[in-house]
Amino acid sequence: MYIEKLNLPKIPHTVITSLLEQNPDLGNYSYVCEPAYDGIAHFSSYTIDVSALSWFKENNLDSYFWSIQTLRDGKNLNAHRDDRRTHVILYIIDPGGENVKTCFYRKLLDKEYEPIKPIPKEELELVHEEALEINNWYKLSVQDVHSVENLQSTRLCLARQLPNIPLDLL
């Protein structure tokens, strides 16, 4: 299964606002992936501290490493597979537009690709695509080749790595 919708509680708007205020786009990122081609979105992620927010403790979500992921200034995120993490849990704060799809692919060539490096689309076959809805939780298999397509604005997500490792160790 590439994407699983999770039955976790919606995060109140006030909590989201508190999370986003922790890094008002000051460049204090834990991880940045610069676009490899024109039109490719800039991916960045920064670790956030949820310890002062009672909502996370009340929902037994306070003992994990959390980050805010952004995709901006592009239409797509390169097709790739992640390094070290097998899955990611995402809460969609802003999907980045109305027709944004998270896509998964099958490799057409018997070839290994380096983690996080762009994989040419002509070497892939689309096997699954799904629009991730605002204010919902998802678990994604990120060892499978995946991309994000049709971005119209900045995509914002709350993210947790599986296994539970901090971003700066990725």
Image (cartoon, rainbow, N blue to C red):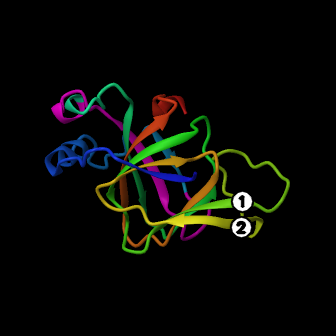
Residue 141 horizontal/vertical position (percent): 56, 47
Dot 1 surroundings within 10 Å: few (below 14), some, or many (20 or more)? some
- The mark found on residue 125 in the picture is 2
Residue drawn at the location 18% of the way across and 28% of the way down = 52
Residue 65 position (above or below residue 156): above
In the foreground, 7 or 147: 7
Residue 81 horizontal/vertical position (percent): 63, 49
Farthest residue toward the right? 110
- How far is mark 1 from mark 2, CA to CA? 5 Å
Residue drawn at the location 48% of the way across and 53% of the way down = 43
Q: Which residue is mark 1?
A: 106
Residue drawn at the location 40% of the way across and 73% of the way down = 152
Residue 54 horizontal/vertical position (percent): 16, 31
Q: Please state the total of marks drawn on the protein image.
A: 2
The span picked out in magenta is 35-56
Tag 2: amino acid: Glu
Tag 1: amino acid: Arg
Residues marked 1 and 2 touching at CB (< 8 Å): yes
Report if residue 54 lies within the magenta region.
yes
Q: Which image quadrant is residue 127 in?
A: bottom right
Badge 1 marks a residue whose secondary structure is: strand
